[in-house]
Amino acid sequence: MIMNCAIIGSTKIAEIHAKHIINNGVKEITFISRSQNKRKKNISNLKKIFSNQVKFFHSDIKILKKKKFKLVCICSKTEIHDTQLKLVSKLKSKVIIEKPIISLLKFKNKYQKFLDKIYKENKKIVVCYPYLYLAKEFKKYFPITKKLKNIIFEFQTGGKSNYEKICINLMPHTLSFFQSFLKKNFLSNISNINNKLVKKNIWQASFNFKKIKIKLIFREKFKKKTYLKLRVNDLILTRKTFKNKTKFINYIENYKTSKRKVIKNPMEQFYKEFFKNLDNTEYYKSNKILTSELMRVNYSLLN
């Protein structure tokens, strides 16, 4: 049982991770960031939900040298993931890190060399891929994938990424989705990458997976809520969320009929599997292999 956790980062996503970590039995959370005010705000927001059932602390990064944590969760900007991985990889902590694991714009074709070194130092690093679980909910609408011919994956967020950074930010979600939605050999069977468009707020490309034509359309910095639209042949489905008090409700909606179906929270499913496999070496190994493959394909789509 993991009883204490350090969360590096003070953004909204850090709070989301904290909620799921607490829901899986962790009794002590320490927020780590440069901004004391942001750390305190995170704690204040969480105390409104969890009251006195969890002990909250906050500090700067130096706390990692003074105190031992069973779990470290990295929720900071992608551009500094590598610096923080260097700090935590030598600890005995289990590590969860937000996607992507490191910046491809920063490391370019040397990304694998860095990852090999990090994984050698700590074999219990897990990158968070909730879209692996989201894809399973979409897949229920398409029991026979052999009949698929054309897929358009449209993904829009209110994120702050521009140009190629949009691809780096959203592609791990997308590729992990298709790895689960199609077949396990998806990442090794992508071909004919073309029609790339890179603008300040839009990134798009198309490619083939065997006989299936796939088009990706990414948008960031749009005022509308985050949504995902999946068009497969003539069927269009959207994934949306709404907040019910302190809980996010996820659902899939038929674009034409407006019929909705509530689905499981993908992040909740990720954490459920993580805590179930705390001491399972195959779980960490599988995530490592997936991460390397996602980074390889993401890099190819950037160039």
Image (spheres, grey):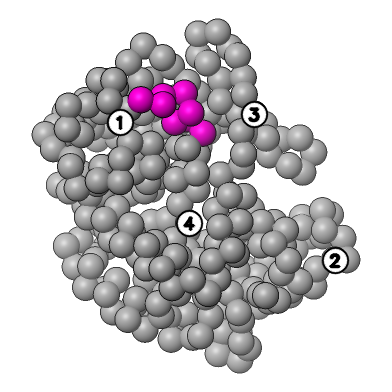
State which region is magenta. 137-144
Residue drawn at x 49%, y 71% is 280
Magenta run includes residue 101: no
What's under tag 3, amino acid-wise?
Val
Residue 53's disc number? 2
Name above or below for residue 82 compared with residue 257. below
* Closer to the eye: label 3 or 2: 3
Front position in the image: 1 or 3: 1
Give residue 78's position: percent from left, percent from top.
Answer: 41, 60
User: Element type at marker 4?
Assistant: strand
Q: CA distance from mark 3 to mark 2?
A: 29 Å
Give residue 295's position: percent from left, percent from top.
Answer: 27, 56
What's under tag 1, amino acid-wise?
Leu
Name above or below for residue 90 compared with residue 58. below
Residue pointed to by mark 1: 216
Crowding at dot 4, Cα within 10 Å, few <14 / some 14-19 / many 20+, comes out as many
Work out whether mark 3 precedes mark 2 in sequence or the reverse, and give the earlier one.
Answer: 2
Q: Residues at badges 1 and 3 in contact (C-beta under 8 Å)?
A: no
Q: CA distance from mark 3 to mark 4?
A: 22 Å
User: Element type at marker 3?
Assistant: strand
What's under tag 2, amino acid-wise?
Gln
Residue 79: in sight, yes or no? Answer: no
Work out whether mark 2 precedes mark 4 in sequence or the reverse, and give the earlier one.
Answer: 2
User: Element type at marker 2?
Assistant: loop
Residue pointed to by mark 3: 262
Q: CA distance from mark 2 to mark 4?
A: 25 Å
Q: Quadrant of residue 252?
A: top right
